[in-house]
Image: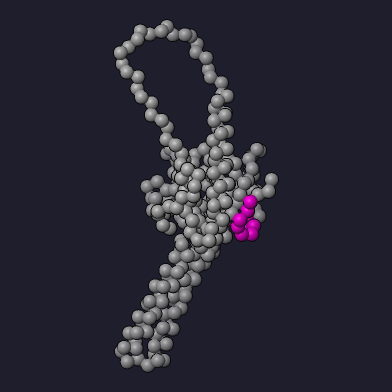
Amino acid sequence: MKVNYDGHEHEHEFEPEYGLPEPLPAGEHVLWQGAPDWRTLARHVFHVRTLVAYFAVILVIRATVVAMNGGTGAEVIRAVALLSPLAALAVGIAAGMALLCARTTVYTITDKRVAMRIGIVLNLTFNLPLSRIAMADLREIARGTGDIPLALSGSDRIAYAHLWPHARPWRLARPEPMLRCIPDVARVAAILKQAWTQDQVRVASVQAVAPVAAPRHQDLPSAPTTQPTPAVKPAPRNRWFADGQDQRLSQGA
C-alpha cells in the first residue's frame, strides 16, 4: 500500500515505525503521514508577522523621538541600530521555534487511530483511536493549508500544556488535539473521514455478531403495571466536517 506522506525528511531512524512508538500491529495500515508547514506555523501560531510589525513600530517611534529632540541623522541611525538586534533576535527565535516544531512533529492516520508525535526536546506520542474521536472540524487558513481539531468522546482528555501548540486554541477546560497547518488539508480531512467511517462500520459489525449470553432461567411474566414506559432519547450523532462539507471554525489560531 502506498502511504500518503506530506512532511520533512526522516530524522528519527531509531523509531521502530516512523512517527510511531512501536511497530504497527498486524492488520493496521498507515493511510497518511505528514507534518505542519513551518512557514504557516510561524505566521499563524508563533505570530512572526505580528512581531515584525510590533518591532517596526517601536523602531519608528524611537527614531522619531531622537529626531524630534534634535538628534542628527547619525544619531537616529545609531538609535535604530541599537534596537534592531533585539528585534531580529525575537523574530528569529519565533521563526526557529516554528521550524523546530514542524521538523519534530509527525501526524499519522491509520485505519485504526490518529497518532501525534510531538515535542521539540522531549518527544511524546499520543494515540487517538478512531472509535474515541467524537467530532472533527476543518479550518482552512491559506493556499490549501489548514487545521483539523479533534474532539474526544467520553471523559478522555489530554492536558492542554502537553498538546500545545497542537491543540485547538482556548479550549482549556476540554482540550482538543489538533493537526496544525497541514498542507492540502482538504485531502487529509477526506482521508481521516473515510477511515473514521470505515472504523464505525467495523465496530458495528463486530457488535452485531457478538454472541449474546442466554438467560439461565425464564422468568414468569409479571402482572401489567400502570407506570408509563420511559421515553428513550436518541444518541447524539457524531459531527464530521458539517455533514460532509468542510467547515470553517470561528475560533482563530
28 relative position to 215: left or right: right
Q: Is residue 39 above or below residue 218?
A: below
Q: Residue at x 40, y 91 (%)?
A: 73
Quadrant location, the C terminus:
bottom left
Residue shown at 50%/67% (left/top)?
95
Asked whether residue 69 appears in the rendered view, the answer is: yes
The verdict on residue 6 being magenta is: yes
Q: Nearer the viewer, residue 121 or 36?
A: 36
> Relative to residue 227, is residue 102 depicted above or below?
below
Q: Residue at x 64, y 43 (%)?
A: 29
Question: Does the magenta run of residues contain 227?
Answer: no
- Residue numbers of the magenta segment: 4-12
Q: Is residue 83 above or below residue 187?
A: below
**Residue 247 appears left or right of 1:** left
Q: Position of residue 163 (x, y in %)?
A: 47, 52
- Comparing 208 with 167, the one in front is 208
Where residue 248 sits in the image (x, y, percent)?
A: 45, 53
Furthest residue in direction right, as rendered:
1
Residue 220 in percent (x, y) is at: 42, 6
Q: Is residue 167 visible?
A: no
Nearer-the-camera pick, 175 or 23: 175
